[in-house]
Image (cartoon, helix red, strand yellow):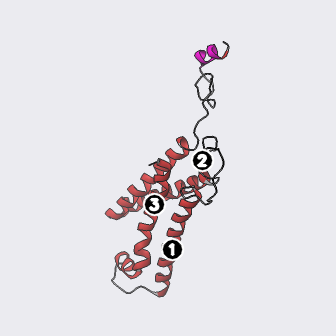
Amino acid sequence: MDVYYFYSYGTAAWLATQAAPLISSPTMIVALLSPDVREATTLEVYFSRTLGFTLITLGVLTVLLTGSVPLSSRLSEGTTTETDDPKAPYALPTLTVTALFHAAYAFYGYAMWTKTGVISFGLGTLGSGFLAVIALWCILFASSNGRISRKTGADKRTSGFPFKNTEADKRKHR
């Protein structure tokens, strides 16, 4: 499985995992978070479920906008995706935004974990931090297939700064 698809589906699964208790039992969430055991107010239930539905929507949008699910049933004739940069036109911006989202979640979870010592915040930090690192890897290395020269076999996007590539220059002048 491609790392790119792993990230898309992993993000959707992680967000759905976080959304499930918010939607299904907001009263339990309020009981766990508040110092006194009490019933959740109508406003707390509303905000909890709204946040849960928002997380699910964000996960679905991530899968759709990164191109993990083809939105068109028409196949191009004889063309391959080797010359196209990522899987969908909005893949790189979606990756960037969700990477920032996961990094912010991981930072916030870590801050809460160091302040309270609650293990759940530590687990949330690990999950979001892992996805943030995978997204960063995808942005840096999986966003294009590379442009390999047929003559030299070198990547065309590289430069000679600060060192010259004398071997490639020899092949070029033959």
Question: What residue would you read off at disc 1?
Answer: 53
Towards the viewer: 87 or 104:
87
Is residue 72 shown in magenta?
no
- Magenta span covers which residues? 163-171
| Residue beneath disc 2 | 86
Residue 117 visible in the picture:
no
Give 12 or 122, whichever is nearer the viewer: 12
Q: Amino acid at mark 3?
A: Tyr
- Give the distance between the C-alpha atoms of the residues marked 3 and 2, in whole angstroms: 30 Å
User: Image point 34% across, 82% down: which residue?
Assistant: 36
Give how far across and how far down residue 168 sits, in percent.
61, 18
Write down the residue under mark 3. 108
Residue 89 — which label? none
At label 1, the amino acid type is Phe
Residue 75 position, x and y percent, is 63, 53
CA gap between label 2 and label 1 equals 28 Å
Figure disc tally: 3
Give the camera-side residue of 62 and 174: 174
Q: Quadrant of residue 174?
A: top right
Q: Secondary structure at mark 2?
A: loop
Residue positioned 44% across, 49% down in the render: 1
The reply to whether residue 136 is in sight is: yes
For this rendering, which residue is in front, 158 or 1?
A: 1
